[in-house]
Image: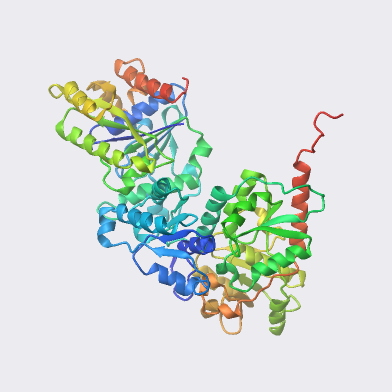
Amino acid sequence: MKQTFALISTYSSDQFGICSALYELGGMVIIHDASGCNSTYTTHDEPRWYDMDSMVYISALSRNETILGRDSKLIEDILDTAGKYRPKFVAIVGAPVPYMIGTDYKAIAKLVEDKLGIPGFGFDSNGMQYYTRGMRDALKAVAERFAVERTESGEETGKEPIKVNLLGVTPLDFGMTGAVGSLKKWLAEHGMVCNSCYAMGCDIDEIAKAGNADISLVVSYGGTGAAKVLKERFGIPYVYGIPMNASEIAEKIGDRGGADGSKDIVIIGEQVYSLSLAEALKNLGIKARVLCQLDRVRDSKVNEEKIEFIYTPEEDDVIKETKEADLVIADPLYGPICGAGKLIELPHMAFSGRMFENDIPNLIGDGEQIYNRIMKEVKRSDEQKPTPGFAGET
Amino acid sequence: MLKIAVYGKGGIGKSTTTSNLAAAFAKLGKKVIQIGCDPKADSTMNLLKGKPVSPVMNYYRDNDREPESLDEISKEGYGGVVCIETGGPTPGLGCAGRGIITTFTLLEDLELFETCKPDVVLYDVLGDVVCGGFAAPIREGYAEKVLIVTSGEKMALYAANNICTAVRNFADRGYAKVRGLILNRRNVDNEYEKVKAFADEKGLEIVADIPRCQDINDWEDKGMTVIEGNPELPISKIYLDLAKKLLSEDGQSY
């Protein structure tokens, strides 16, 4: 049956991708829906909820407000609350009911912005799309709105580290594993520095700095929108991938007799993460395919190692693929369709929420191919820049 | 790019007016897109010699997936006008307004404007601004001007008044503005005076005065606009003059 999930869980929705992406940026996020959605988000998909304050609200949309199209109540509530707390921005996040009546979130955001002088965003999410899309739209919006032109900070010596934007980092894909710290450490070990991280361990000022980078590293589908904006606005090139050390996973594969590369292995998960893992396993002599049910990047640069990639949103197709595979690397909630002994658990918060949050590994490390890709792209970008003083010389 | 939404009471002649206007723009050398926003899906019929384009909602119904190219949901008609119809849900079920918004989102995803690079986009919208979906064509990014088709009949003017009120309610949202009225005559007594009085009360201009004309019906029977059928007719000249006026206001030459 199409678009039906009878055995496995479903991924987090677009609304929560937006909330997760904006969580640390000091804005006020309002999910426009009947009460209930916020507890799903805070209970299952937002591990920062109890440790870090963030202004995430629900509008508590009622039946009459829906039928009558009474946007005024929402607008008044936002003006009242945002006027009081003065957030860095206001984001109105769509949900199924207002989606069905065609609520114009962007118009409401504009109205709020005009009245309060606080930047406003309206997101056409509807709870029927994946978190990947919500994250993409949210990070794209803040890049469009807040990122500013490159600012030079004094004399350049020519030995400055390469400044890298990390795009698409949220707990939904990386958990609370310390991945941001590891990514920054990896950059430092390779003579680079994190310029701006969209959007963990980051505030709105750091978002604004993104125009200063030499390159963007897109670490999930959620970072693709911002990457394109930063390229268009500031000419910052981008590459895809996560530097990964797959030895922990390879060991588990070895325990199942697959270390010699003889097993048919399929990785299920977010596209950039899964391809990066497959690439890291390939470096260890283990071949794996990738299956993705989520939004996927269609740019060939996302898969430079030409890993076998299957996209399908359908559960029936996943059952077929996992049946054919010898080993499946996936979230534990894929267990019911994998068959006994096949599953190597790799918890993914966007799929199983906080159920296995303590078991999410931090695989950041190695990643020589990623480094090479960055250097190649930076070099190409530098070659395309006009040389100062060259014009007119013979 | 000139983007216009055409509203008016049901049966007042919106589709006839819109498709003649589209044909007039095309006749003046402009690249035109006409999007019918009505479940009846008959807006563009007279640009297509009676061979209609399959509506977007039909595509969803028949294929249970999104179309991947514009070719699957559009057809080129007279003068290269790109014709698209939103269509609607199964009668009596679903939500037609939501269908319009879904169509617009799809057209954005398929990069309609980037691909066709139109000079003029016309939205022909069902009757009144009855719900959020039917206001979609006047949202920011879509039409910038609204033309209201009306006759001197009481109910047509009543609908025109409702449309004016709805559009003005959206003033602080950055939506389209009412550009003016198109008087599509039904030969009621003192018709011009009645419409002029309404226009004056609302501070609007009557941008065209279209007489009741048998030529329109005759060419419609052949699946054509009068512009295609005979651009030299006096009635064709009225549509061409309106097209020229709107292009001039938009700073476009012809």
Residue B55 sits in which quadrant? Answer: top left
Residue A68 placement, left or right of A254: left
Residue drawn at x 46%, y 60% is: A129
Residue shown at the point (68%, 46%) measured from the top left: A151
Q: What scheme was used to colour the molecule?
A: rainbow
Q: In this view, does A315 lie to the left or right of A275?
A: left
Camera sees residue A299: yes
Please provide percent x and percent y for residue A369.
Answer: 76, 62
Q: Nearer the viewer, residue A104 or A178?
A: A178
Which residue is most to the left? Answer: B189
Which residue is at the front of the view, B211 or A341? Answer: B211
Q: Where is residue B156 in the image (x, y as percent from the top left)?
A: 19, 33
Closer-to-camera residue (A328/A20): A20
Q: Judge whether A54 appears above or below A51 on screen.
A: above
B39 lies above or below A93: above
Asked if residue A243 can be seen in this view, the reply is no
Report x, y in % for residue B113.
49, 38
Of residues B156 and A4, which is closer to you in this image?
B156
In the picture as drawn, the residue positioned furthest to the front comes out as A84
Residue A95 position, x and y percent, is 39, 60
| On screen, residue A341 above or below A29 | below
In the displayed structure, B75 sits above or below A9; it is: above
Numbered label tally: 0
